[in-house]
Image (cartoon, rainbow, N blue to C red):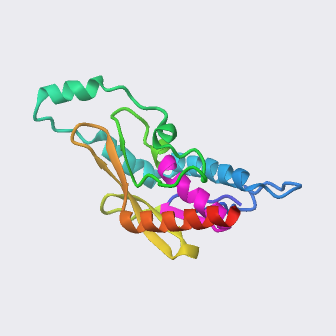
Amino acid sequence: MLMSLHNVGIVLLLCTPALRAQPTQPASSSQTAIIADDRLRAWLATDPDIQEKITQAQNATPVFADPDLKDAVADRPADTAISQQLGCQDFKNCAVPPLALDIPAGEPVEPAIRAILRPWIWLADARGARLGVMPAGEEGEGVLAMNLKSLGLSGVELNIKPRPEGGVHLWFSRGLELATLYSREHDALLAARL
C-alpha cells in the first residue's frame, strides 16, 4: 500500500507492512533504533512541509550591523559531525540530550534534526515504546511535533528560526520539562539494567 507523506506523521519504530522487514529473529534494541533513524532520515528528506520550513529559515537574509561580524562568521569552519559535537553516541552515554542546536550557514539542517531527536528515539526504544513525530502546524516556528505518549509527552514542538549571523537555530519547546523527564527516565532505565 502506498502512502503520501504529505501532512502525515510517522511513528518511529512502527512501520507499515510494506516497510516491515520480516526477520527470522527479533531485532535488538540498537537495530530497532537504527531502523527508526533511517526512517526519520527518509521522511525528513521527502516531507514537503518540513522541507519548506527548513528552506524558509535557511534562506532568511541575516542582518549584519557590523561588517567584521559577517567576516568572522564566514571564516568559521563548518561542523559536519553534529552527533560527535553533542556527545550523544548512544543511550547509555547520553545523560543530557541536546534541547537546542545552532547550525552554521551552509550546513544541512536534517542531520541536526535527527541528532536532536535521536536521544528520544533511544529513550522510546529502551522503554519499549514508540516515538511519534509529525509536521508542526503551518503557523509559527515549529517544524515538528514530538509525542511519547507512554510518558505523557505530547505536542512538544521542535522549532526553527534563522540566526542573525547566518544559519539556523533549532530548539524544543518546553525544554525544562523535557530535560527533567529525560534525566529521570534515563537514570531509572540505566539503574534497572545494573
Q: Main secondary structure of the magenta part?
A: helix
User: Which residue is found at the position 53% from the left and 48% from the top?
Assistant: 46
User: Which residue is found at the position 27% from the left and 37% from the top?
Assistant: 166
Residue 107 image-quadrant placement: top left
Taking depth in this image into account, of 157 and 43 the one nearest to the observer is 157
Q: Give yes or no for residue 161 being in the magenta stretch.
A: no
| In this view, 66 is above or below 53 | above
Q: Which residues are magenta?
A: 114-134
Q: Give yes or no for residue 123 being in the magenta stretch.
A: yes
Q: List the single residue furthest toward the left.
A: 65
Q: Is residue 73 left or right of residue 67?
A: right
Q: Give coordinates of residue 52: x percent, y percent.
A: 39, 49
Which image quarter is the N terminus in? bottom right
User: Which residue is found at the position 21% from the left and 24% from the top?
Assistant: 71
Q: Is residue 132 left or right of residue 144?
A: right
| In this view, 17 is above or below 89 | below
Residue 105 image-quadrant placement: top left
Q: List the single residue furthest toward the right.
A: 24
Which image quarter is the C terminus in? bottom right
User: Which residue is found at the position 64% from the left and 54% from the top?
Assistant: 36
Q: Give coordinates of residue 126: x percent, y percent.
A: 65, 62
| In this view, 116 is above or below 127 | above
* Residue 5 seen by the camera: no
Q: Give coordinates of residue 151: x percent, y percent.
A: 54, 74
Q: Is residue 13 left or right of residue 61?
A: right
Residue 49 image-quadrant placement: bottom left
| In this view, 23 is above or below 146 | above
Q: How many marks?
A: 0
